[in-house]
Image (cartoon, rainbow, N blue to C red):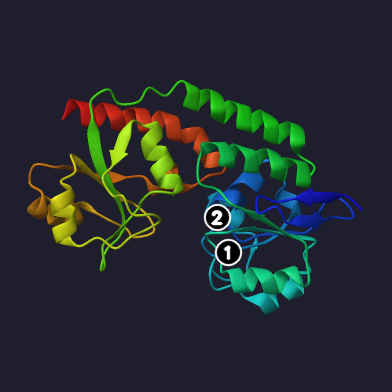
Amino acid sequence: MPVFYDQMNNAVSLPATPRRIISIVPSQTELLFNLELDEQIAGITKFCIHPADKVKHVMKIGGTKQLNLEAIHQLQPDLIIANKEENEQSQVEKLMHHYPVWVSDINDLHSALNMITMLGEVTGKQPEAVALADSIAKQFASLKPITQATRVAYFIWRKPYMAAGQDTFINAMLTLCGFKNVLTANRYPEVSAHELIAANPDAILLSSEPYPFAQKHIDEFKTMLPDAQVILADGELFSWYGSRLLYSPKYFTKLIEKLTAM
């Protein structure tokens, strides 16, 4: 029986190429469709929104952190694709008792590209996955980081304010753009208004997800730091680590140009 290893170094035994796949990670769901595995995708989460014209036809099995285990059992998958950060460990471990579960662990571009090629191998789409990863890598290779020193804070949540700290995929994307994250804490720390003012970033990026920041929130942050540039950022292009990375370098280039012009 073929044995594959996931990014947690877990052994995943698959007797044959999977024909009933459940993805509980939105960015990886989009990747599976990009690899033309439409017929094999049996279940996805309610947060799997891309590609819109295809996900609407697939059975939903709850949220990324609140899975409907009974619905999953009804589908009888022969492979489940999960992620260390986006899914609840206890639920993933329960599923491992019944099904092969492949878990990704992604914190930078290298691990994202590695995930793409590894999933291609697991799902029988290795040539397509390698080509996709190569295309993404080439586009990032042409990305020109911002030339002027720009200190930024990237917010993902409000009430309480939460931001992307060190050791996150978002921070890795900021670094590739040439930005310096003013927050030194790891993961996703809560940030008070006092702490933000003390950090004094040149720019504040408000993510479109998971919290839907809008224009009114730009005004809110401007009251705290009148001299900082406050911009709404496309959260998917900063945090989705599957095939959506195809669009990130072009978006980052425009963002760099916008900040440079300000």
Q: Is residue 215 above or below residue 66?
A: above
Determine if residue 255 is in view: yes
- Residue at left offset 48%, top offset 27%: 140
- Residue 115: % across, % down: 64, 43
Residue most extreme to the right: 1
Three-letter residue code for mark 2: Pro
Please give the label number shown on residue 26: 2
Which residue is depicted at the point 58% across and 57% down? 25
Q: Quadrant of residue 253?
A: top left
In the drawing, does residue 233 fall left or right of residue 21? left
Secondary structure under badge 1? loop
Q: Residue 11's spot in the image, x, y percent?
A: 78, 55
Residue at coordinates 16% horizontally, 60% vertically from top-left?
Answer: 193
Tally of numbered discs: 2
Q: Earlier in the sequence, mark 2 or mark 1?
A: 2
Does the CB distance between marks 2 and 1 fall below 8 Å? Answer: yes
Residue type at mark 1 is Thr
Cα separation, mark 2 vs mark 1, equals 7 Å
Residue behind mark 1: 45
Q: Nearer the viewer, residue 183 or 27?
A: 183
Q: Quadrant of residue 129?
A: top right
Q: Height in image: 240 above or below 69?
A: above
Query: Residue 26 at what x, y percent from top left?
Result: 55, 55
Instruction: Categorize mark 2 by other alpha carbons within 10 Å: few (<14), some (14-19), many (20+).
Output: many
Compared across the picture, whether 2 is left or right of 55 comes to right
Q: Is residue 34 visible?
A: no
Q: Secondary structure at mark 2?
A: helix
Quadrant housing the C terminus: top left
